[in-house]
Image (spheres, coloured by chain):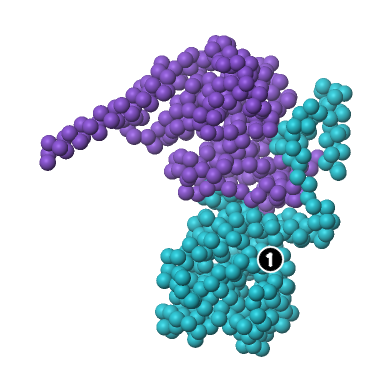
Chain colours: A cyan, B purple
Amino acid sequence: MLRSTRSLAQRTARSFSSTATVFTHPTKPLDPAPLPSAASTAPPPPQPNASAASGPSTHFGFKDVPEALKESMVKGVFSSVATSYDVMNDAMSLGIHRLWKDHYVKKMDPHGGMQCLDVAGGTGDIAIRLLDHAREKWADRETHVQVFDINPEMLEEGKKRFAKTMYHGGPQVSFTLGNAENLETIADNSLDLYTIAFGIRNCTHIDRVLKEAHRVLKPGGVFSCLEFSKVTNPVLAKAYELYSFNVIPELGHVLAADRDSYQYLIESIERFPPQAKFSKMIEEAGFTVPKQEPWEDLTFGIAAIHTGVKL
Amino acid sequence: MKCSACFPRSLATASSCSITPRLAPRSLSSHLRHSSSSSSSSKPSLYPGHVPINAFQNSLLAVGSAFASLLDTSRHDMVAVLSETTGGPFLARLRTEIRSTPSGRSLLRERPRITEESVDLDKLAKMKEGSLGREYVEWLRRNKVTPDTRDPVRYIDDPELAYIMQRYRESHDFYHVLLGFGVSLPAELVVKWFELANFNLPVALLSSVFGPLRMETGERRRLMSTYGSWALKAGAQAQCLIGVEWEKEWEKDMSQLRRELGVIPPPVPFKAWRAEGRRLKKEREEQERAAKGFAV
């Protein structure tokens, strides 16, 4: 409504004065407000759904968006980055993300025919490592991983990755499309291990994700989350921030032809709660967090592994 | 006035390169209310799509896009980024040139865009044979491009200079039509040489010098000897094409337009040059086959 009033004001001003200041139109970069004759041919700017716009808002990176829309926006981001996801991860973290994921899986040490759920499993990095670890260290071919993701393009990439491994078409892996906040297809108390790597910060309601995780795990089951976190050392924190905001979006633009998704990435990392707060959230969902090591910092706190056990 | 920074409206449609240019869906732009802020630069966002970057980011993008566009010649978005990050003082000189003509001044006032919406392609297709509008539509159809395959400008800080860069990008197709070249790599290179002489932009220099390295030596030499000196001479002699209001010249006959703008025709039409290339290649292949036959 505000937009149409402003464009009306602009058009009126324009028609009265040839020297009136011309403002650029909000949805057409660098254009002055369209003239009345041209306005009929130009399509109206897409209006957000009235009910969604009036609802509660949440953060999408540094922007505020209606809560109901965050999910589809995140979906859009990941559809966009799916094919270059692995290339970009390697470029941004200089390959260190592989070391993080190797350590993460080694720490969990899956074996003994576990039922695992890898949420936001997308391209299958964690799932493949879980199965490989069980096989190589324990000669375990019974462990099953369900790769779960909200985004169809990411899941497709995961299926492609798995097609290159020996687990393809076998009983050890399955793929499910769904929302981590509502694991309706999974029964209560049915899983031994719930993993979520670099996914939970994209969820709209982290508390609901944690509650669902608690529901589907068996008593004695483990919740393990690998996520970006806060760097504790202030000097390194500044260096990390400079690197994030100056290098990563540019890398995204050059390598993946997508600056905005990576701008969202670094902003969402900033927005994610720090280690202690997230650990508290895990406790509030009903998990028991080990007292000696409630979380483990990786690479000075750039990433952190949070663990919780359902007792 | 606080501009809202929307995600750009369109990127180049998926081409056959390995990393497909894509962006978050269009619907995102209507939902983002507040301007994006990166802690690296506290400059405000001056026009929709503007991303203020600092000098370090600028140089990183310039170097990155230079390599990316050379390694994968279908990455037009990388050439676009290169043009924005290396514009600098050269764009300001271009602005002075535009301001010196009445049509250029009118462009800067009105800021018309050449996109799918602003150009009525059906009407142009019905125009007289040999007119700019008709030739333009036929060129688009022959080369399978649309007016919308150009990226919006994001990294230039001055809105007026950003418009000039956007105009340069959108008018690029008209230079093709004016000179009579398509969108293949050799044809694009000739147009870039012409642009270099006409606009003196660093991106044109970089593309003109490094672009030909992507061609085979023999073809490259043939291209340079046929069109090299002509392109530079024609570009230098012609009027500065960036100030031309293409929208007002749809009905004009092409030969008259070329005369008015001072564009001298190429020594050999590109189709003939390409046909000659194919003939030479066939001859070479036959010779090789004959040589192999004797060796056996």
In the rendered view, would you say A174 is above or below A310?
Answer: above
User: In the rendered picture of this protein, how many numbered marks are placed on residues?
Assistant: 1
Q: Amino acid at mark 1?
A: Cys
Q: Percent x, y for residue A1?
A: 86, 44
Question: Label 1: chain?
Answer: A
Query: Can I make out residue B163 in this image?
Result: no
Position of A91 with respect to B96 (left or right) is: left
Q: Residues within 10 Å of mark 1 (few under 14, many from 20)?
A: some
Quarter that holds the C terminus of chain B:
top left
Determine which quarter of the picture holds residue A188: bottom right
Determine which quarter of the picture holds residue A11: top right
Q: Percent x, y for residue A136?
A: 41, 79
Residue drawn at (62%, 45%) of the image: B54
In the rendered view, would you say A45 is above or below B102?
Answer: below
In the rendered view, would you say A175 is above or below A75?
Answer: below
Q: Mark 1 — residue?
A: A203
Query: Can I make out residue B270 in this image?
Result: yes
Q: Percent x, y for residue A93?
A: 52, 61
In the rendered view, would you say A297 is above or below B3?
Answer: below
Quarter that holds the N terminus of chain B:
top right
Callout 1: helix, strand or loop?
A: loop
Residue drawn at (76%, 42%) of the image: A45
Residue drawn at (12%, 39%) of the image: B295
Residue drawn at (83%, 41%) of the image: A3
